[in-house]
Image: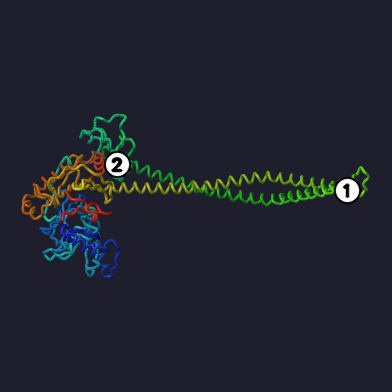
Amino acid sequence: MRRAENVSGRISPALRSIAVCAVAFAMAAYPFAVDAKSKTGLLRLQSQAAASATAQSKSPLLIVVSIKKQRVRVFDTNGEIASSKISSGKPGHDTPTGVFSILEKNVYHVSNIYSGASMPYQERITWSGIALHAGDLPGYRASHGCIRLPYSFARKLFGLTKIGNRVVVSYDDPDPIAFDSPKLFKPLPLDDATAMQGSLAKPQLIAVNDRPDDHSAADTGVRLIGISPALLRAVADMPKDLQRRPTTRAEADQIMQEKLDRAQAAVKTAEAGLASADEKVKQTAKDFTDVNQKFETARRSVEPLREAVKTAEAQQTAAMKAFEAYMSSSADSGKTASSGADNGDSDRESNLEDALLDATIEADKARADAAANELSFAVVQGAFSSSQNARDSAADALRDAQSDLTSAKAALTDVNKEMRLRSKPVAVLISLRAQRIYVRQGFEPLLEAPIEVAPLKHKVGTHVFTAMNYGTDPNTFDWRLVSAQTPSPGQAFDEGKKKRRRTALAQGRELDIQMANEALNAFTIPDDIQQTISELARPGSSLIVSDRELPLHENGSGTEFVVLTR
């Protein structure tokens, strides 16, 4: 684990508690061995958890843990639905405060360092080892950083919660406050009718930096400023026609369904192409086998004729050389038929001429026979080459069809994943100090970009806004504010927390609302990102605004957002 130190060079108590619990929960994500008795206990716990799950609320949940009051409370859209005493981290192993979410749930978990201590109904809120779980409650802070719950309540809570439910751990005991602000994002209108009721303007152009009244026909290009690659891909995947960017939730669903239909159709087309290519490979392979047999037969038949031509031509050459040699020797001796050469020489010459003539006739005949056969062989050879090329082309087409199917299936997987993510709320974090916005959905990072932030004169704290449901107007959200950390008005960034407790605790919800409004008014979200958030937003979506930076060591893969306030 990366060590994080405070300004004095010592490890802070919050991070020390994380480090201690990290080892205890290092094996939480891995299978573990249990004996027969433990297996029986596991089955019992699983059965109880399943029974508890029937009471699971369909509303988004807010889980608020108070270190000061050693209490946990659970809220849904209608208010508080459950509460219990807890036992948090003892001094030196303090439970970290801040904004978390449930990352993992295990009915049965045991510590791998504390003598196999049982931690039933574990609900992890950091990957470094902090969790809610059933355990001993002695009436004071006694854990090594985790949040212990009574056994019956831990079982009840396990049945209520889902992965991703928000958990706020605060020193104080904040209540969720009904809250509204024009800076909070709104959902897309439900449908065209409600969009008309809301006097919705024409579909927004995305990421255009010109003034609204200055969109000339010659300048409609999209310019993305400071946008992450994830958003670039998302925008690139939008319909090319800007009018097709969804303006209502119904249209967004329709566009997503059309995208899914296209991906499914592409897979079917690729499967049909692969089947056709495979059949073509089989047919061309069979054709090649047949033609190859004919080619081999023709090749075997033409070989003797070629050899016969070679033999006949060799005999013709030998006869020619014999005749030429005789004629050359006769010329040298001055003997000619006309000068009265003896009959023996005449016969010799006649025989050589006859032999040459016979050899020439045989060579011509061999060449004629071979030529006729070569014509037939050329036809077979042409068919062989054509069949071989067809076979090789079919094999190439099969490889292309396999690649196309792999790509189409990968695209369908991506669309199915996108469909699953659409059912999950979107989480937005704005770090005023880092002047950045982060958007995640289903623990998946969607985008990260710089935003405009006004200079902060003092601390504004960390505030969580949760869209609990659609409002009475279906084009709005019913928001709840939970302030994880609220400084006193005018508190400087280097001012300690003790003064804050003396001066601000008594002010309660009024101070939370004041600081939350100051936090909201400090930033401006670019229109294109605001539009993207609206397209994704649904009940359970949240906005976290903090004057702290995002701790990278707690916000890796498989995490929504963890903002530590202590």
Percent coordinates x, y for residue 264 in the rendering = 38, 45
In the rendered view of the protein, which quadrant contains the C terminus? bottom left
Asked where in the image residue 139 lies, by quadrant, the reply is bottom left
Where residue 407 appears, x then y in whole percent? 40, 47
| Above-or-below relation of 290 to 42 | above
Tell me which residue sits at (15%, 63%) in the image. 92
Regarding mark 2 in the picture, which secondary structure is present there? helix
Amino acid at circle 2: Asp
Report if the CB atoms under discs 1 and 2 are less than 8 Å apart.
Answer: no
Please state which of residues 202 and 213 is positioned toward the viewer in this rendering.
Answer: 213
Using residue 322 as the reference point, say whether residue 147 is left or right of it.
left
Circle 2 Cα neighbour tier, 10 Å, few/some/many (<14 / 14–19 / ≥20): some
Looking at the rendered image, the quarter that the N terminus falls into is bottom left
In the picture, the disc for residue 333 is 1
Determine the residue positioned at 31% across, 34% down: 221
The colour style of the image is rainbow
Q: State the CA–CA distance, disc 1 to disc 2.
A: 113 Å
